[in-house]
Structures are given as structure tokens and as C-alpha cells.
Amino acid sequence: MSGLVLLLAVFNTLVVRTSGNDLVGPGAMSTYSGGGGRRRPTSYVRVKDPAVGFFVAGSSEEGLNGLYGRTDKAPPGASASDVEISYRHLDTGWFMALRRQRTGDPEWVFVDPTGHERLVNSEYTLIPGSGQKWRHAPAKGKSGWFSRFGRRGNGDGGEGEKGGEGGDREGSKKPNTDETRVEASKAATTDTYHELPWQLIAIMGEDMLKQLAGHKRYHDGLVRAALNCKPPDPEPGFRGSLDLVPPPESVEAASTPDADVALEDGELEEAAAKYAAALAKLPRSEDEDERDGWTRAVLGLRRARALRKLRVLDDAARQIEEVRASHPRYAAMLFESALLWLDKGEPTAATEAFLDLACVDRSYGELREWLVRTRAREKRASIWDDEKRKIAAEKAGERRRLNLISLGATRFCVAWRQTGGCDPVNGAREPEKDLPCVEPVSAGSSGVCECAAPSTLLDLIESALAHSFAREHIDRSAAARVNATRASPMTCSHDGGVKCAVECEQAWRDGLQNVVEWTERLEAEARKTDYAADGAEEATGAMRTALDRMRRWERGEAVDDAVDANEDARANVLRDFLNRARSGSDALQQAASAATSSDGWSDHYAVLSLPSDFTESELRGSYRRISLRVHPDKPGGSMVDFQRVAEAYTVLSDDAKRASYDSGEDVPHKAVDGELTTVWDEVLEKHFPEIWGFKPFGDPYERKREYERRMGFSGDAQSRSAHDEL
């Protein structure tokens, strides 16, 4: 124990950075990251005592992975005096121990339930390192690895001290290669690094160990629930089979080569018709035997597939339900049912169908891949639904705001129109900040008051001023002072408080006064020549008409003989409201369309009306047909739709882009402790927990991949093999 006492004395003087009081990372001398990029808050603690347990992961030897708790028991074949510290796996019977040697420092070992040494780490520390810090142990003879006559921990696999090791008591030479390990089944993987513990976390507190054990039990419960799920039940009065696959004789009896060739060649209508004809030839009776029942199910499923690819989805659904009634656990039928839901644009229902298939056959070909594709489409549909709800809410808010503005309009004013950039004339419009006429404009806002007087009045005034007689006697720039439609343009340098209702009325009064003065001036000048001057009568008459129309509008009378002035003002406000609402809706819709295309939220399969398992010829044909239909030069065509069709084809026609799209790389991923997960991770963790495994500290292979990158996989056949496996 002298070595351990000395070690503890050293550790009492060291301050080790850890991820808290309960967890210590590999080697106990570096910051614990948990693996997988999950960084946790760190603090400083003194490591005075051995850990109460360890969490081990990343080894291809599944029994080695898991939680270990401190124990007084020695590994199989050893005594308490052989070890300084011992930890036992909470489930599998593996041991992790710091064992003594005859000479030299103790070393860490992993021991399997049969008592054979499997891995060795020569670090004499309270917290051993992970990954390549470990190596495979040499054989120890027939009586097991543990012996009071242990070898030195030099890692070279050479001979031990005199007297031999373990059961090598007759002086036989100790083998010096790893290829003679006791368990022959492990010989093939000797010298590989897959069995090494690539994640090794020290647990320093009893509470943390209990908490992790509870999480492990919960995970085990998820695994049991997934593996013991309830398969689809037959309907009452069921007469059929609960087998997963048809017998060979039924498959042979359902042989229809002509229909199969037609389906493969894309002659879908012909294939569906031939399958239907084959079904019609089968005798139907109450006491139909199992062979005939399966034959009918196989033909029915093939017809459903042809109908689905033909996009006759309702008929395909009826055919599948007929097969389901007699063979509810027919694996291929459940798979086809899921594809049908996908082609209908209902990925949530497709997920349920795939999970039914997983319940009856978890090893069905590409099942996990299809669940990932389905989940990715489900997430896109959810994102687009949220976006549509957001757009609808924005439209409703825009209509309510415009309605309030229209209700706040006065006889002389429509609304405050806000602009950006402190430029009331050329600044970008900010319609969401428009105000009713009766509300004060806030300080620092730029814009202009839009007034309600008909623009036809301004046209009459400008027409009168355009006469040559008027140009001689009235300054042409004076016309700019009369603006019946806009008033009080403001930059940002004002104190606020202005109300457009007041500003527009004042602008109207000033404009009316100007027209009165101009009319009087023109009449006075015309009388001097007894209206003989060129254009005097026309200019005077035009200005008098403009003044008369302005006074009639001010009194609420009809500006024109057939138009009531109040009606004209109200129509102007209503027209403004409708135009603004329409333009706002169009802008929102265009923004949504652009987002749908650029962010990949649209369903490319739905855009091209393709089955989920389309062929190359189906893709080309659908693209040609739909792109011609939505071409901008065609009636009813749209550039947005045309671009969306082109984008869908670009993605689905490229194998790499399609694989990325199907795996959901374009959709936002959830973050767990700052680590982004993929759709694949989500599906495995939720639906295949037995494959996903127990990962409380993130990715257990993070350091393994770093190690492989450093190795480069060059010149090492075993490393290349490992890379292929990964």
C-alpha cells in the first residue's frame, strides 16, 4: 500500500480542474468535457480519494461498457490482496481494478466475468486515461490472468520474472505475442483499438452514481419497451395469417411476369390492370386455405404499389386495407402502407406505419433510413405549418392595423405614412409603423401625412396653371404650395406630437386660399383687356372651375355632377385600405414563398408529385410535365413556382444532395447541452434505443475519431478496416 499512500499524498497537494464535484475526466489531469462536445461548467476540487465509480463507453466489447461501482470484492480468480482498488460492473460482471504486481507499480486492468484479463493501462493514477492509454493484455495461461506473480507493466508483452506467470508453473515459455489470448474468439481483433474504452469518466460522488444508475435503468426500460412493443392486432372475426412473410409456394403462385415487367418499365396502368385481373381469377371462399390467402395478399400488395406510383392513392389505400384485414403483420404490406402515407403528404401517419413495421421486424431492410427520411419530412411540414400560421397572423394583424387607420381617417386626412432613413420623400416605406390621423407622431419619426382630398382637384389646379395667360401672371413654382394629397413631410429632427388630422386640414385651408388669390388675380388681369388677351378667358375659367370644385368638396357636395364629395372621400380611404391590404398580403406571400424555397422547407417530393421511392425515369418525366405547366410564359404560370420545381429537381436528381435532403441536414436540429443532434440521432435515440445505447456524457467515440485522424489511416490495414466499419 506504500505506493498508494504516496500517490494520495501527492494528490492532496494537487488541484485538479474538473466538471464539478462528482465527475472527473480521463487521466484526472485535464478538463472533463464529457465527450461529444458537451462542455459543462468547471470548478476546482482536490482529488483526495479514489472514485466511487466509473462510466465506461466506446468499446466494441459491449459487456465492458457501462457503470462500475466501488467494491471490496476482487475480480474472479483473485484475492483481496491482489488489488488495491476494485470496481465491479453494475450489470455484466466485468471488473476494473488497480492490481498489484510482484515488482513495479500497480496497473489498471479490465477483467471479464470469466476472470481473464482483457485490457491493461500502466498509468499508476487514481483516474486512468481512456482510449489508446489502454492496450490488449497478453495471455496468462490456463488458470486465468490474476496471479501474485504478476509481470511488470512495461507493455512490451515480454517474459515475466522467474517462476513464470499465472498458471505457467512448469517453466513453459510465456508467449510474446497477443495472438494467443485465452479466448480464441477474441484473437481476430487482437491489436485493434475497437475494444479500448474511448470514454472513461470517474464518478466522485455516491449521489451521482445513483443518479446515473437510475438513468441507466430508465434507458433499459426504453429498450425493453421498444423490443417488446405490441404488434398490430387483427380485427374481430379475423381469418388469415399473422406471419410476417408469405410462404414460397404463395409467392410462386402469385407470379405474374407480364405485370412485373410492366411495373418495372413504368407502365403503371397496365401493371395495375394485370394485377387486378390476376386477383379476379383467384377463387374467393369462406374456407380459403392459407396458401391461397397469401397468394391474394401478395397480388393485392403488388397492385397497391402500382396504384400508388400511378398516384391513384385512394384506390391504393383500399387495396392495402384489404390486405391488412387478412394479414395484419405482413411486413411488406406495412412498409407499403408507410410509403403510401408519405406520398399522401402525411409523414406523421407514415411514421406510425413504420413503427408498426419496427414492432414486427426491427431488422427490415432500410427501416431506420426510411424513418429518418420520414422524420425529416415531418419536421419540414411542421416548420412550414408554423410559418403559414405566422404569415396568417401577420396578415390578420395587418388588416386590423389598416382597419384602425381607416377608422381614424378624417374628412381631410387618410393616415400618417412612415418612412425610414429620416427621408420623408425617398426613404423606404415602413407601413407597419403607419398611424391613424388622430394619433400624434412620435419624435424622431420620418414620413408624411397623406391627405384625403381627391387628386382630381390637384389635376384641375395644375391644368389651369398650365395656360399661357396663367403662366404670365402666376409664378409656376407657386403650384407646389398646393398639394391636396400630402402635407407636412418630416425628417427625424422634430419633437413629435404632430397630428396629421390637423396638418392635412391646415394644408387644405392654405391651398384653398392660394386658389382663391390666383382666381382673383387672373380675373383682374383679364378685365384689364376685357378678356381679349390671349388665353385669358380659358385660364380664368379653368381656375374658377377648380375653385368651385374645391368649395363644393369642402361643403360635402359632389365634386362632379354624378359623384358625392363625401362618397368620394370615403371611397378614397376604402381604396387606400384595400390597396394597402392587398400589397401587404402579396409581400407576405412572396416572402413566404422565397423562404420556403431558399430554406428547403418545401417538400421536393410533393412539388414534383413523385412517389417516395421514385425511379430516374419517373423523376425526369414528372419534372418535364410540371415545369412546362408552371412556366412563367404559360397561362397561370409563376416564376416562383418554376424556380421551386427547378430546385426540387436539382436536389432529387443528385445522389449526394438527395441523401443530404432525405437525412434532414437542411432542417434545424435540436441542441442538447450545446451539442446539435441530427435527425438520425433523434430517430435512433427515440425508436431504436438498443442501438443508440446509453450515452449520458455525449458521443463516446469523439476521442477515437481524433485518434484515427491523427493516424491518417495510411499504411495500416487494421486502421483502414476500422474506418470502413465506422
Image (cartoon, helix red, strand yellow):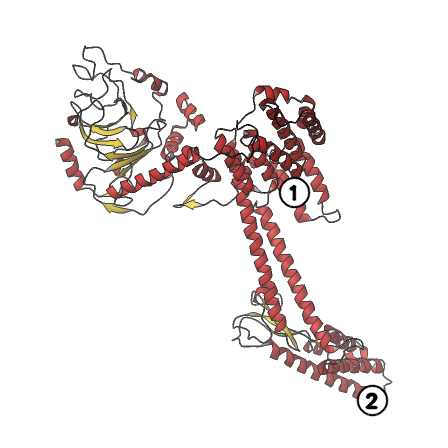
Picture coordinates of residue 554 (x, y %)? 71, 82
Report the side of 684 relative to 613 (left or right). left
Choose mark 1 or mark 2, whichever is in front: 1
**368 with respect to 14 (left or right):** right
Name the residue at 36% across, 39% down.
218
Q: Which label sits on residue 645?
A: 1
Check disc 1 and report its element: helix, strand or loop.
helix
Location of residue 320 with respect to 207 vertically, above or below: above
Q: How many marks?
A: 2
Q: Position of residue 434 (x, y in %)?
A: 58, 68
SS at badge 2: helix
Outermost left residue: 2
Q: Position of residue 648 (x, y in %)?
A: 62, 41
Question: Badge 2, how many Cα within 10 Å: few under 14, some, many 20+?
Answer: few
Counting residues from the start of the chain, the first of labels 1 and 2 encountered is 2
For the question of whether residue 5 can be seen, the reply is yes
The answer to which quarter of the image holds residue 656 is top right
Q: Residue at x 56, y 75 (%)?
A: 439
